[in-house]
Image: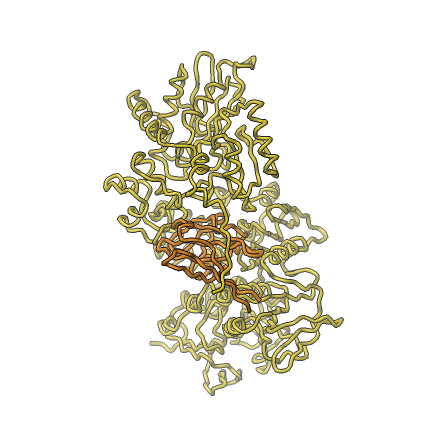
Amino acid sequence: MHLRKKLVLVGNGMAGLRMLEHLLKLAPEQYEITIFGAEPYPNYNRIMLSSVLAGGAGLDEIVLNDTDWYKEHNITLHMGHTVTRIDSVRQKVVSNQGVEAEYDELVLATGSNPFMLPLPGADKEGVIAFRNIQDCEMMIETSKAYKKAVVIGGGLLGLEAARGLLNLGMDVSVVHINPYLMERQLDETASRMLQKELESQGMKFLLSRQSEAIIGKKRVKSLLFAGGERIDADLVVMAVGIKPNVELAQTAGIKVNRGIVVNDYMETNIPGIYALGECAEHRGIAYGLVAPLYEQGAVLAKRLAGVQTEGYSGSVTSTKLKVSGVDVFSAGAFAEQEGTRVLKYQDEVDGVYKKLVIQDNKLVGAVLFGDTNDGAELFSVIKNGETIEGREKELLLGIPQEALASGSGNSRLEGLAADEIICGCNGVSKGTIVQAIQEQDCTSVGQIKACTKASASCGGCKPLVEGLLQIYAGEAAVPVKEGICGCTPLSRDEIVAEIKRMRLMTVKEVMNVLEWGTEEGCTKCRPALNYYLGMLWPDEYVDEKESRITNERFHANIQKDGTFSVVPRIYGGVTSPTELKKIAEVAEQFEVPLVKFTGGQRLDLLGIKKENLPKIWEALGMPSGHAYGKTLRTVKTCVGNTFCRFGTQDSIAMGIRLEKEFERLNTPSKVKLAVSGCPRNCAEATIKDFGVVAIDGGWELHIGGNGGVHVRATDLLCVVKTEDEVVEWAAAFLQYYRENANWNERTSTWVERVGLASIKKALESKEERLALQSRIQATLSKTTDPWKQIIREQELRKNFEPLTKVETNH
Amino acid sequence: METKKMLVGALADIDPKGSRTIRVNDMEIALFRLSNGKIVAMENKCPHKGGVLSEGMVCGTAVHCPLHDWRIDLNSGAVLDPDSGCVTTFPIEVDQDKGLIYLTLQSA
């Protein structure tokens, strides 16, 4: 065995370790490796610290390389050792505990320290940074005994610390020297929206404040600002920035500026000594984010392994704020400058803001607030430097998901260099993912995640990982068998078959017998099972209202402010002066904030408090319009030959008949019908689940249309002559859909999945149609108007009313 | 610290896997009844976008927020993975003999 060269790594953090992992893949036998780490822990994911603080992750969960990993790779780890001296002549390093190690190659990855403001009183008890595990522990301890926390610094780190402290139950104020937050990542508009959102979460802000001194005896009492204002504080967290750890390098005579100066190959001015990560300064920039560290690591690993590399040419960075309930993304040069053009989208209703900065037809920067789904994709467009001429608006308004997984998205993914980082959170390159697919036979995103950690953190890169899977696994990329939800591996068809075979009668029984993975299921499987059981056993099954989604439990549509809307049934959209007067009176009596026509020709009373719902229903005296459920919604009609000079048939009567026939029907997903009196199709029947278009002497029946998210025109099912035939076919089609579609699957998706031909075939014999019709009639005969039932039965009605309290003297 | 204990209702007022609400001062509190009969109380507000938790679905020991399906642990008030945060919970006592529910509030 030849003698291995000695590699010493100073710093046991993410940058150094990531580089080593890379190096071990390229040249597993080349070096004998020794690592010195000052923290008494193995390498952990520092960017997940805020999750530890937020209570979402335990310490064990953020460890990236456990002690076994070091053993496995024969790495000598000196944990808790700080290297105090480098002897570049004798080529050795010495630790504070007297351990010496010789090196042939030395890598400095000493990271950075939090920058502590040199304020008078900064050494008092209760003044800390937010940088390592001990800081987190300190915050958790403090929160148990104290109340008021002040975070100095309204940047990324400061806000994450502040959110963590809020979670710990503390009263948190953020002090920031600038007039708006996160100015290094956001423009003023996005920053103001962020501030508003955080304020609604309970965070307080003191902007444009210069901290002057920390007051207190032994422990901090308050923070004093220039100008004399002060704020009480039991805990002060400084999160104003970081400074590269350069002392060790400096004393060894290595060239240091703000950080340790390195060239494109991460080499310092002394041969055999390299630096990377937060301690290094490349072309004048010392990076404090994780993605550049990985890119530097890839270059250095190749250098050390003797593999050809083009070198490191700097990084375009992107940022995501890890604060729950807030979605912020920023990348590249987001400031508007001379020579740039800007596209903005601002929606203060939903709290969405997007800004793209374009220079020479290339995307150079982006800021997203509220909706950051496209962040990873935009970032990749920025990094590629491709022209976006003609696509600007598409990029601004959102990239359709289909486009990511196919077409132009894929050809760009194919063109990416193997070095390109796909997962910014965990620093996983395209090459690593492709290798996992080709050499470790990963055939699903889940397996790639387990193998490489790609998409394991924020998940923003999942579409890219899926795209790579499609390109490089090809046919092998069969999706792993996924059940109807995370609670079971069983598919809809398997579940329905088992329920029939074993005559399972309740949701609980299904879960027990079919070995559900969770105790009481989730919001996906519970309503699905409730539907399948009701569909299979119309006579015996008792509907479980607690397994219904909110809208169906309260028989009204929940709105964003927690109020509800009421839509009474108006058959075929035909009303009368008496009915309109009634609705108007009720709206006035209950001071209904908004009365509006719906898209389905009905009247909607919006902004109703839950406790008023039964009262309004009672006052209206009309049946439920079922505008809230997975059921028949409306049958839209045009005037037809009753008044219209083009009308060929009585579309109103046909529509009313269909609506009366099928109202209250439970279906896998919502079902909308329409009847048009002539081929001009004013009722828009060809984008409905079941659309009827009158022609001279007959009716065209259309199925599988949708006017919503995925617009789809109907397929023509058949042409019939009489109104009775229309009802017969509608009944047969709806029942066949009820018996075969997945819960929550619209007819449009279902028709595409099973194919029009299979449906035509199933409905082709009259006998079969009549059998389906009699089954649907049996189900319909069991339904009652839910509003009337709730008005009548106190046991149901109580759930609409708040409880009242009685104080006692216990 | 002042502790206030109040009678808020009877067991029969809350359906299994169901919820009722009560307003105390300026806060709305949701009371849930788990399948095992346990009653828990927490602020009726999801830490994400303020969704009304009492209208969510109770699954085992968690309630799913009706707005964006965040899951809140009914025993601790903690938001469950993959999201994070927590909801304030309140102590509940149940007089099993009389079937009455008492809520305890602490105010400064």
Q: Position of residue A532 (x, y in %)?
A: 34, 39
Q: Residue at x 58, y 26 (%)?
A: A580
The colouring scheme, among rainbow, by chain, secondary structure or one colour, is by chain
- The image quarter containing residue A453 is bottom left
Position of A268 with respect to A726 (left or right) is right
Q: Position of residue A37 (x, y in %)?
A: 47, 77
Q: Is residue A293 above or below residue A411?
A: below
The quadrant in which the N terminus of chain A is found is bottom left
Q: Position of residue A511 (x, y in %)?
A: 30, 49
Q: Is residue A255 above or below residue A503?
A: below
Q: How many numbered discs sit on the rendered protein?
A: 0
Query: Going by the picture, which residue comes out furthest to the left?
Result: A502
Q: Residue at x 60, y 49 (%)?
A: A351
The tint chain A carries is: yellow
- The image quarter containing residue A219 is bottom right
Q: Is residue A225 above or below residue B96?
A: below
Query: Going by the picture, which residue comes out furthest to the front?
Result: A809
Query: Going by the picture, which residue comes out furthest to the bottom?
Result: A98
Position of A769 with respect to A294 (left or right) is left
Q: Position of residue A170 (x, y in %)?
A: 56, 67
Q: Which one is in front, A804 or A183?
A: A804
The tint chain B carries is: orange
Q: Is residue A230 above or below residue A566?
A: below
Residue A117 appears in the figure: yes
Residue A454 appears in the figure: no
Q: Which one is in front, A269 or A460?
A: A460
Q: Which one is in front, A466 or A315?
A: A466
